Image (spheres, grey):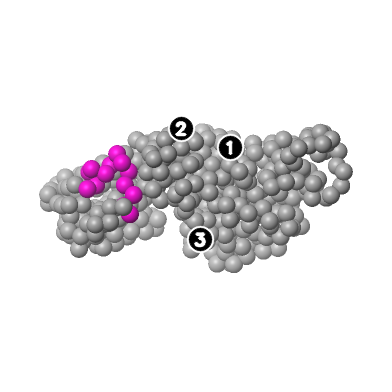
Amino acid sequence: MIFSEIAGHENLVENLRNMVQGGRMPHAVLFSEQSGCGALPLALATIQFMFCRTRKALASGEDNPLVKGLFGDQPDNLPTQDSCQVCSSCIKVRNLTHPDFHFVFPINTTQIVEKGKKAPMDSYYDIFRTLVKENPYFSEEDLYRAMELDNKMGLIGVNEAAWLINRLSFTSYEGGEKVVLILFPERMNLEAANKLLKSIEEPTEDTYFFLITNAPGKIIQTIRSRCRLIEVPPIDKESLAKAIAEKYRMDDKKALLWAECSQGSFGRAMQLIESSEEETEDFEDFISLMKLAMDKDLPSLVSFAGDLAKRGKEAQKNFCRSALKNLRQMYLLNLGEENLAYMNPNQAEQIKDLAGRLDKKNFEKYYDIFNDTIECIERNVNAKFIFGDLCNTLYLNT
């Protein structure tokens, strides 16, 4: 990944580039974002720029044979503001195969790695490389789906922390930086976090940590306080529309519409455009759930709750997040603010129909119901109790 491939975030790109060029890159950086807004591409582009041998040669100011070998004696356009993409380090980082670049992410037992065992972290690397190559704006759910975790949550445990500490204890293979990328550190348990704290707090020379989170408040304070926090905002509408148009060969007007309804998340835009079966199912299930509540059909609601309880935890949370998004859109419609609703064009008619049938005084209650459901799922409350209560509460408040 290089800076010029990133959708939007021009100011962040400039700041990160200046940090590297000025030798001011913090030893621990925490990127905080809403899912799919570009933190991973920013981190990967920065890491590749750090490792780029051409950049280092140009920064030294010396007549370096590496630059001549790659670009000739009198190159017209030396890559001074981005990675060169052709040196050995750039190629290795881009392919996620650089021996001094380690990545850690939540894992669990899976049937596709060592026959259902929780293998060492690097056993999952091929899965991770494929996912990043296909979509660097992927979500936590996309990662779990790629690893085929089914209904299990990923975890960064003490074994993963010990594995990383062991890797960092070795001298750099190529004599330069060692970089660690930690995805979703909010999934790190307390024992693992405490084990890694010293490495993050007092890293060895030329060791850098990049952490990417969707929930910074769930990371223990001792780790958060050791990191430079970089807030990654949603991608601006124009830049996102341009990226969508290029990726899907779509006309500008239609791309802008998708950019608006995805609210600054390229990952979300790709999900919407590609209309995954699961997302369509979540939307249709939400419409059905609310109609059953309005019709006061309690037996069907009880059956519906049982079906929801059988899903995996991430799928359950995604259903609730989808419900919250739909409720927001309907509330804005009831306020006469359709231009702010950012509806999926394929779902707009059903959203408008349901919005006209619900009392807007109840929307705050609905928000609380679905937010409480997400919290209960994350606390591992019995799923039958969770969704039985959800459907019963909707029945009583609709």
Please state which of the two labelled residues, at mark 2 or mark 3, is closer to the viewer: 2
Determine which of the numbered discs, if any, sits on residue 216 in the image: 3
Residue 53 in view in this figure: yes
Q: State the image quarter where residue 197 is shown.
A: bottom right
SS category of the residue bearing label 2: loop
Residue interval drawn in magenta: 340-352
Instruction: Please name the amino acid that badge 2 sits on.
Output: Arg
Q: Position of residue 320 (x, y in %)?
A: 32, 51
Q: Position of residue 112 (x, y in %)?
A: 51, 33
Instruction: Quickly name the residue at label 2.
Output: 249
In primary-sequence order, the first of circles 3 and 1 is 1
Please state which of the two labelled residues, at mark 2 or mark 1, is closer to the viewer: 2
Camera-side residue of 126 and 165 = 126
Residue 211 horizontal side relative to residue 201, left or right: left
Determine which of the numbered discs, if any, sits on residue 129 in the image: 1
Q: State the image quarter where residue 336 is shown.
A: bottom left
